[in-house]
Image (cartoon, rainbow, N blue to C red):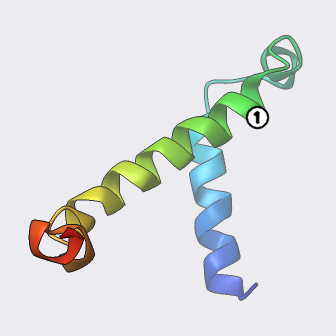
Amino acid sequence: MDKKKKYSIDKAIDSLTEDTTAEDLLNYPEFLKEFQNRNLERALEAEMPGHQGDEKHSPEMIS
């Protein structure tokens, strides 16, 4: 991973956890799993508009 990407990830983590203590995170063991799930959902939602007009799903291609 290049330094610029690592720095961006570190900034995002800092932003997400600036009001959170280590104790808060340890008391919420599902945090990482929930974080991953929500990020995946956002990524898929962001990608969907590009696929709604996809030719392979058009009625002409199905019949």
- Nearest the viewer among 59 and 37 is 59
The x and y percentages for residue 24 are 78, 15
- The residue lying at 26 percent from left, 67 percent from top is 51
The x and y percentages for residue 25 are 80, 22
Compared with 37, 57 (above or below) is below
Q: Which residue is mark 1?
A: 32
Q: Position of 44 compared to 4: left or right?
A: left
| Quarter of the view holding residue 34 | top right
- Nearest the viewer among 27 and 7 is 27
The amino acid beneath tag 1 is Leu
Q: Position of 11 compared to 61: left or right?
A: right
| Quarter of the view holding residue 7 | bottom right
- The residue lying at 85 percent from left, 25 percent from top is 22
Find the residue positioned furthest to the front. 63
Q: Position of 23 compared to 52: left or right?
A: right
Neighbor class of circle 1 (other Cα within 10 Å; few <14, some 14-19, many 20+) is few
- Nearest the viewer among 41 and 5 is 41
Question: At numbered mark 1, what does the secondary structure look like: helix, strand or loop?
Answer: helix
Image quadrant where one finds the N terminus = bottom right
- The residue lying at 64 percent from left, 36 percent from top is 35
- The residue lying at 85 percent from left, 19 percent from top is 29
Image quadrant where one finds the C terminus = bottom left
Compared with 50, 49 (above or below) is above
Q: How many marks?
A: 1
